[in-house]
Amino acid sequence: METPTTPEPVPAHALASLTLVLPAYNEAERIGPALDELFAYLDASPTGLPARIRVLVVDDGSTDGTAHLVLDRPEAARPEAHACRLELLRVAHGGKGAAVHAGMLAATGEAVVFADADMATPPDQLPLLLAALGSTDVALGSRIQPDGSDMRATQPAYRRLLGRLFHGLASIWVVGPVQDTQCGFKGFRLAAAREVFGRQRVTSIVFDVELIYLVRRLGYRMSIVPIRWEDRRGSRMRPGLRLAIRVAWDLFRIPLLHRGVQP
């Protein structure tokens, strides 16, 4: 076990700046409405948000004009000193895990959050995550509510079944009691983000599991934050034998990678 590197607590009001990372791959049809929704909320300056917000869209090698749509938005032309502005980071196509990795390491500010580019988690859930980061190092959004209900109940039956099988494997080998590892809404204090993502090795769809494993292994304080979520259809995940083998293999090798074993 490595020595914990937990930073000192920071009051919620001291989190004065935020980078929101949005990984995007061929999202030309959805990125415009999603950013409309996001900036309508951010520009209203609701309570619970930092004074300075940087929205960083990480274009994961899109071929459909996603990057141009982002760059053409008025928020991208705002001066650097503006309280809330939009930026684009282009990377070679490597999947969501690789795009999130690049964005989180390029982030600045006291708090860093990544979210799905389709706004499946509404922007008004941001203050909940940021409030948790006032007294913890990592805040994990969870679609499981305090009463036990699960917002994933709206997903197709096969997705729910696969999710239960996946969680059964992940909880035994890697993530312990965390019930919703795959919620695409996670926040970090900057120091924690840089260390955790600096050690990230897995970029497949199970990259969230590795992040949680590292958070626990490094001794960071972690909070689970129930959030609202809506199933936005359009997932590019295609279940099949090849994907199942990749998922099982990555789950198996995550702890080994961080113990110096090369499976």
Image: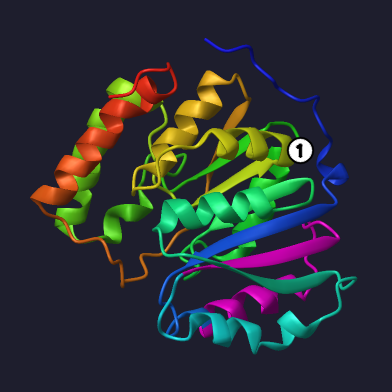
Residue in the image at 49% along x and 37% along y: 200
Quarter containing the C terminus: top left
Q: Which class describes the residues within 10 Å of circle 1: few (<14), some (14-19), or many (20+)? A: some
Q: Could you tell whether 122 is left or right of 160 in the image?
A: right
Q: Is residue 5 magenta?
A: no
Residue type at the position of mark 1: Gly
Q: Is residue 71 left or right of residue 66?
A: right
The residue furthest right is 81
Asked if the magenta segment contains residue 36, the reply would be yes
Front-lying residue, 118 or 23: 23
Q: Nearer the viewer, residue 90 or 3?
A: 90
Q: Is residue 258 left or right of residue 17?
A: left
Q: Is residue 41 above or below residue 22?
A: below
Question: Residue 239 location, x and y as percent?
Answer: 16, 56
Q: Position of residue 214 (x, y in %)?
A: 51, 27
Q: Is residue 205 visible?
A: yes
User: For residue 12, which quarter of the picture?
Assistant: top right
Rendering coords of residue 36 (x, y %): 61, 82
- According to the picture, the residue beneath numbered tag 1 turns out to be 134
Q: Position of residue 197 (x, y in %)?
A: 57, 40
The answer to whether residue 21 is left or right of residue 231 is right
The magenta span reads 32-60
Disc 1 element: loop
Q: Is residue 227 visible?
A: no
